[in-house]
Amino acid sequence: MEKHFKVFTLALVMQFKKELHQKVEGFDILLSGEQPYFKETGLLKDSIIRLGFLAVLPSNQILGKIGAVPSEIIKLALERLSYKGNAA
Protein backbone atom coordinates (compact mmCIF):
# COMPACT_ATOMS: atom_id res chain seq x y z
CA MET A 1 0.00 0.00 0.00
CA GLU A 2 1.49 3.31 -1.08
CA LYS A 3 1.38 6.15 1.44
CA HIS A 4 1.12 9.77 0.41
CA PHE A 5 2.25 12.60 2.64
CA LYS A 6 1.33 16.24 2.42
CA VAL A 7 4.25 18.62 2.49
CA PHE A 8 3.86 21.81 4.50
CA THR A 9 6.13 24.81 4.71
CA LEU A 10 6.26 25.75 8.38
CA ALA A 11 6.87 29.08 10.05
CA LEU A 12 8.31 29.57 13.53
CA VAL A 13 6.25 32.20 15.31
CA MET A 14 7.88 34.08 18.19
CA GLN A 15 6.18 36.19 20.83
CA PHE A 16 7.48 39.74 21.08
CA LYS A 17 6.73 41.75 24.22
CA LYS A 18 7.46 45.37 25.03
CA GLU A 19 7.20 44.66 28.78
CA LEU A 20 10.95 44.36 29.32
CA HIS A 21 10.49 43.47 33.00
CA GLN A 22 9.17 40.05 31.86
CA LYS A 23 12.54 39.13 30.31
CA VAL A 24 14.00 35.85 31.55
CA GLU A 25 17.71 36.65 31.88
CA GLY A 26 19.98 34.34 29.89
CA PHE A 27 17.01 32.97 27.93
CA ASP A 28 14.78 35.61 26.32
CA ILE A 29 16.37 37.94 23.76
CA LEU A 30 16.33 41.74 23.95
CA LEU A 31 15.78 43.69 20.72
CA SER A 32 16.89 47.25 21.33
CA GLY A 33 16.57 50.38 19.22
CA GLU A 34 20.34 50.75 19.64
CA GLN A 35 20.98 47.62 17.54
CA PRO A 36 21.80 48.29 13.86
CA TYR A 37 19.13 45.88 12.56
CA PHE A 38 16.32 47.15 14.81
CA LYS A 39 14.50 49.03 12.03
CA GLU A 40 14.21 45.78 10.02
CA THR A 41 12.27 44.13 12.86
CA GLY A 42 9.24 46.35 12.33
CA LEU A 43 9.08 46.97 16.08
CA LEU A 44 8.42 50.48 17.37
CA LYS A 45 9.88 50.07 20.87
CA ASP A 46 12.52 47.98 22.60
CA SER A 47 11.07 44.50 22.94
CA ILE A 48 11.95 40.99 24.01
CA ILE A 49 11.54 37.69 22.21
CA ARG A 50 9.89 35.35 24.72
CA LEU A 51 11.54 32.03 23.89
CA GLY A 52 9.18 30.20 26.23
CA PHE A 53 6.27 31.15 23.98
CA LEU A 54 6.94 29.75 20.51
CA ALA A 55 4.60 28.18 17.98
CA VAL A 56 5.04 26.42 14.67
CA LEU A 57 2.33 27.04 12.08
CA PRO A 58 1.83 26.11 8.44
CA SER A 59 3.06 29.14 6.51
CA ASN A 60 -0.26 29.42 4.66
CA GLN A 61 -1.82 30.44 8.00
CA ILE A 62 0.49 33.46 8.26
CA LEU A 63 -1.37 36.47 6.86
CA GLY A 64 1.55 38.83 6.51
CA LYS A 65 4.88 40.02 7.77
CA ILE A 66 5.64 43.15 9.76
CA GLY A 67 9.39 42.70 9.95
CA ALA A 68 12.23 40.25 10.29
CA VAL A 69 15.03 39.41 12.67
CA PRO A 70 18.54 38.79 11.37
CA SER A 71 20.01 35.30 11.15
CA GLU A 72 22.28 35.91 14.16
CA ILE A 73 19.19 36.37 16.36
CA ILE A 74 17.66 33.14 15.00
CA LYS A 75 20.96 31.36 15.70
CA LEU A 76 21.06 32.77 19.25
CA ALA A 77 17.46 31.66 19.83
CA LEU A 78 18.24 28.12 18.64
CA GLU A 79 21.33 27.97 20.87
CA ARG A 80 19.33 29.06 23.90
CA LEU A 81 16.60 26.54 23.12
CA SER A 82 19.08 23.65 22.75
CA TYR A 83 19.42 21.42 25.78
CA LYS A 84 23.10 21.05 26.64
CA GLY A 85 22.81 19.19 29.94
CA ASN A 86 23.55 15.56 30.72
CA ALA A 87 20.88 13.00 29.92
CA ALA A 88 19.53 11.25 33.01
Image (cartoon, helix red, strand yellow):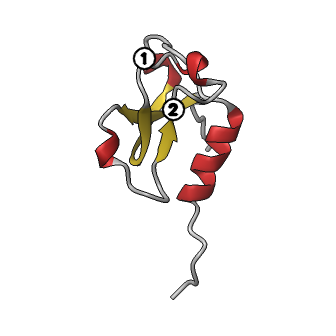
Q: Amino acid at mark 1?
A: Leu
Residue 2 shows in this picture: no
The answer to whether 4 is drawn above or below residue 1 in the figure is: above
In contact (CB < 8 Å): disc 1 and disc 2:
no
Residue 81 position in % (x across, y down)? 54, 57
**For the point 30% across and 47% down, which residue is it?**
22
In the rendered image, the residue lying farthest to the bottom is 88
**For the point 56% across and 84% down, which residue is it?**
87
Q: Amino acid at mark 2?
A: Ser
Q: Quadrant of residue 49?
A: top left
Q: Nearer the viewer, residue 54 or 33?
A: 33
The answer to whether 30 is drawn above or below residue 84 in the figure is: above
Q: Nearer the viewer, residue 32 or 70?
A: 32
Q: Which residue is mark 2?
A: 32
Q: Which residue is mark 1?
A: 44
Which badge, 1 or 2, is on the more N-terminal residue?
A: 2
Element at label 2? loop
Residue 84 falls left or right of residue 65: right
Mark 1 closeness class: few <14, some 14–19, many ≥20 residues within 10 Å: few
